[in-house]
Image (cartoon, rainbow, N blue to C red):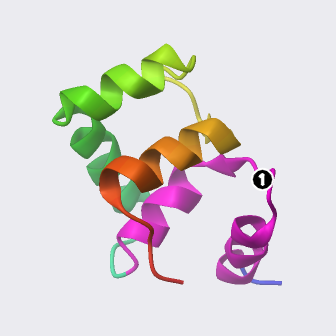
């Protein structure tokens, strides 16, 4: 199973935990996973309302995964990604 297939399966699961890299690749599919992750973290830093909401739900910039509540916030603030 490829990484993209694995990511798609996780997205379909209601209570999925996804890594920052998996989510970043969903928002930036044309970027390499490493660069997508770096860009995505910078985007969070530059979006203070999103960062504050994520931190209120226990997420910090040094974390490597997003839980369902975090994923819901990302979709609320940034919109759903295309699969």
In the foreground, 37 or 79: 79
In the rendered image, which residue does mark 1 sit on? 16
SS of the residue at dot 1?
loop
Residue 48 sits above or below residue 13 on the image = above
- The spot of residue 7 in percent (x, y) is 68, 71
x 29%, y 38%: residue: 44
In the image as oriented, which residue stretches furthest toward the left? Answer: 46
Report if residue 49 lies within the magenta region.
no
Residue 47, located in which quarter of the rendered image? top left
Image coordinates of residue 83 in percent, x first then y, are 54, 84
Residue at x 41% of width, y 51% of height: 76
Q: Is 6 left, or right, of 75 in this rendering?
A: right
Of residue 7 and residue 12, the one placed in the foreground of this image is 12
The residue located at (53%, 54%) in the rendering is: 21
Residue 78 x, y percent position in the rendering: 32, 55
Residue numbers of the magenta segment: 3-29
Q: Quadrant of residue 70?
A: top right
Name the quadrant of the N terminus. Answer: bottom right
**Residue 23 percent across, percent down from the top left:** 52, 58
Left or right for 67, reference 25: right
* Left or right of residue 2, residue 41 in this image: left
Chief secondary structure of the magenta span? Answer: helix
Answer whether residue 33 is visible to the viewer in this image.
Answer: no
Assess whether residue 13 is covered by the magenta stretch: yes
């Amino acid at each position: 199973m490829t990484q993209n297939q694995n990511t798609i399966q996780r997205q379909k699961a209601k209570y999925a935990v996804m890594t920052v890299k998996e989510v970043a690749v969903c928002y930036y599919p044309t970027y390499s996973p490493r660069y997508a992750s770096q860009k995505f973290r910078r985007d969070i830093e530059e979006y203070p309302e999103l960062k504050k909401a994520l931190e209120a739900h226990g997420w910090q910039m040094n974390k490597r995964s997003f839980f369902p509540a975090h994923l819901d916030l990302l979709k609320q603030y940034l919109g759903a990604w295309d699969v």
